[in-house]
Image: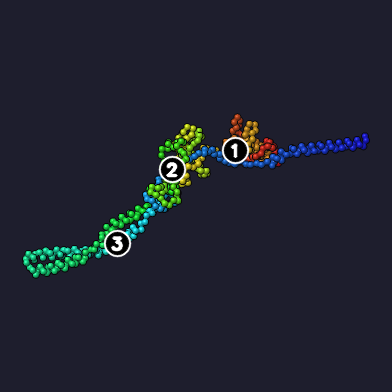
Amino acid sequence: MSYEKREKNRKKRKLFRVTIILSIFIYLIFRSVPSLLANNAKTVQPEEGTLIEKISAQGFVIMDETIIKAKNSGELERTSIEGERLAAGVEVANVNSLNDTSYLKQELETIDKSISALKKSENETKLITNEKEKIEDFQLRLVEELQNNVLKGNLEEIYILKEQLALYDSKAKDISFSNTLVGQSIENLKDKRNKIDAEIKSNHIKYYTNHGGIISYKIDGYEEFFLPKDFENYTYDRLNLKSTSKTDEKESIIAVEQPICKIIDNFEWYVAIKIEDLNEVQDFELNQTIRILINGDKQEVKGKIIAINPYEDKGVLVLKLNTMLHHYYDVRFPEIEIIKYKKEGYKIPTKSIVDKDNLKGVYIKDKSSIVKFRPVIIIGEDKDHTYVNKGDSNGNIQIEGEDNLVKTITLFDEIFLNTNNIKEGQILN
């Protein structure tokens, strides 16, 4: 064999060995990629969660509202705090008339001074009155004595008696009352004072609560439309959002018969809820207690169904409530969410769920780093997450068509989010 031929064979053998080595190397790389990807795959643990099914609807608040209206026009002064709970008989506002009553106040001051002065001189007046009565009695006796002496013809006695009678007549005139204000009776002055005081008060009227409740100066015009009675009349076709005249709570000038404020009974209130599809509430019954959310608040409010008013395929639920009015007394048309039911379960990402042998489930990494499939029973979905059954106390569930219970996920399982390179039984490092 020539040198050239040997060299050629040697190169062939070398190329063959390199090819075999590269093939093995590539094979090992491809075999290790899934394991590498699986080892680096992201996992999450389940969370305990509550799946809530809600019905969104339009609400109409109904309250027992008593409006206080102005009896006079003028400048309004609010004397209570908006939304405060008040007892009966508490001042809530006063209205000062725009008329000038300064002259009446001056006259009232004068009369008060006169009454005070007259009271101080009452004792003195009584003494003068008694003295006058004594003089008048003595004058009568002198007249009788004078008449007797005239009949007897005693001229000397007649002259003396006339002089005495003239003297006492002069004294009686000196102690007579002059026709002045101080000389008037206290009763007359008090009567005049009461009349002037009433005239002044008619220009400055105070307003009080006639029963206890929540005070509100926000008048929306629906107080006399949404009355807490005849709840069967709150039907779908009659409940509409309409604009009404509202009272500006910052307004300072008020007219006669214009609403000043309202007192809301804070023991009971009602919400009429328009239902777009009556089938959604077909399981609800009268006197059943349900929970609602108002205007997106997280605080649940309990209410008892007191009326179900169907209208074609729609309807209205009327709820009676006895809590939380102080939070919502100034809301007339709230957005309502009816809580239809709540289900407790495990919350997992929806994208982690796979189908295997016609079963819904997830792949988990157990304590031994072995990939295992765990079946789940789906109870509902919420955006990007799915709620699944927790199983019994041992974490087992009953799969349809299976005789025995099977193990489902637990709170401590590591669930794979991306299952493209995940296989059951795979051992991870």
Residue 398 is left or right of residue 33, and the answer is left
Q: Which residue is mark 1?
A: 386
Position of the C terminus by quadrant? top right
Q: Position of residue 310 (x, y in %)?
A: 46, 33
Query: In terms of depth relative to the viewer, which is nearer, 290 or 196?
Result: 196
Residue 54 is left or right of residue 191, and the answer is right
The residue type indicated by label 2 comes to: Tyr
The residue type indicated by label 1 comes to: Thr
Q: Is residue 372 visible?
A: yes
How much space separates mark 3 and mark 1, taking CA atoms? 90 Å
Q: Nearer the viewer, mark 3 or mark 1?
A: 3
Q: Earlier in the sequence, mark 3 or mark 1?
A: 3
How much space separates mark 2 and mark 1, taking CA atoms? 44 Å
List the single residue furthest toward the front.
Answer: 99
Residue 114 has which mark?
Answer: 3
Residue 349 is left or right of residue 228, and the answer is right
Secondary element type, mark 3: helix
Q: Nearer the viewer, mark 2 or mark 1?
A: 2
Residue at x 6% of width, y 67% of height: 153
How much space separates mark 2 and mark 3, taking CA atoms? 53 Å
Residue at x 81% of width, y 36% of height: 20
The residue type indicated by label 3 comes to: Ser
Could you tell me if the residues under marks 2 and 1 are in contact, i.e. CB atoms within 8 Å?
no
